[in-house]
Image (tube, helix red, strand yellow):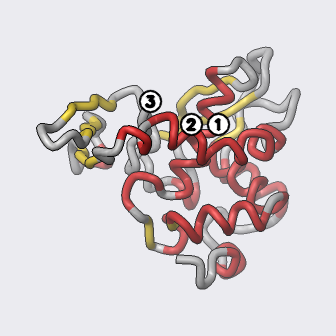
Amino acid sequence: MELCPRCFQDDEVIPRRLPDGAIEYVCSGTHQGSGPHTWRGSSDPAAGEMATEGITDELLEPLLACVVPGEPFAEYGVVEYRFRQQYPQLFRAHVRERGHVLTGKRLDTTASAVRFAMALSRQERSGLLLKRFGPATGAWAYNQRISYWARPPRPSGKSLTWVAYCSQFGRPADWTDDDRAACAGLT
């Protein structure tokens, strides 16, 4: 399972093995009107799904802890923000390695946010989380839609968007200097 580095979704991604052994991925999503996105994976079989999932092992429990039991579906930005607040060293380590859209720099298909979303998706496959898609809000609005996460059983009621979450704390829904400082010098 490969997440698109532009839309952070895997439901429209199709892999194709190239003659040199590398894997080319095509996401047929609209990507805010720019159309399908294509990228290459590694020709090294060890760098495939198992290696990528190994990288996300250390993220499983921390990210699961950022999805609050009994809460409605929470927009991805809420989960990532909680992760950054609760596990700053782990967050910074992944941003240092792969970049983040927050800093304006992302390094190919394993940007830190893709790793975080992959770890959340692994928890979904294990039955520990539920996922749905909805509108991306605030700083995340560059995505047309984004993942929302909840703990089982499936919650009812209105989802917790990034904008609503920010308003609870009186913080802007756009990136702040504090947000940028959390990633300063890491990419």
Mark 3 lies on residue: 1
Tag 1 near tag 2, CB within 8 Å: yes
- Judged from this view, the residue extending furthest toward the top is 153
The residue at the point 42 percent across, 36 percent down is 2
Mark 3 → mark 1, Cα distance in angstroms: 13 Å
Return the mark for residue 147: 2
Name the residue: 57% across, 42% down: 117
Q: What is the crowding at mark 3: few (fewer than 14 residues within 10 Å), some, or many (at least 20)? A: some
Disc 3 and disc 1 in contact, CB within 8 angstroms: no
Quadrant of the rendered image containing residue 48: top left
Q: Which of 80 and 146 is in front in this view?
A: 80
**Quarter of the image where one finds residue 106:** bottom left
Q: How far apart are marks 1 and 2 (CA)?
A: 10 Å
In front: label 3 or label 1: 3
Q: Can residue 100 be seen in this view?
A: no
Q: Residue 179 carries which label?
A: none
Residue density around tag 2, few if under 14, some if 14–19, many if 20 or more, within 10 Å: many
Between circles 2 and 3, the one closer to the viewer is: 3
Choose between 54 and 179: the one closer to the eye: 54
Question: Which is more toward the observer, 183 or 75?
Answer: 183
Q: What element carries label 3?
A: loop
Mark 3 or mark 1, earlier in chain = 3
Q: Residue at label 1?
A: 120
Q: Is residue 74 left or right of residue 44?
A: right
The amino acid beneath tag 3 is Met
- Which is more N-terminal, label 2 or label 1? 1
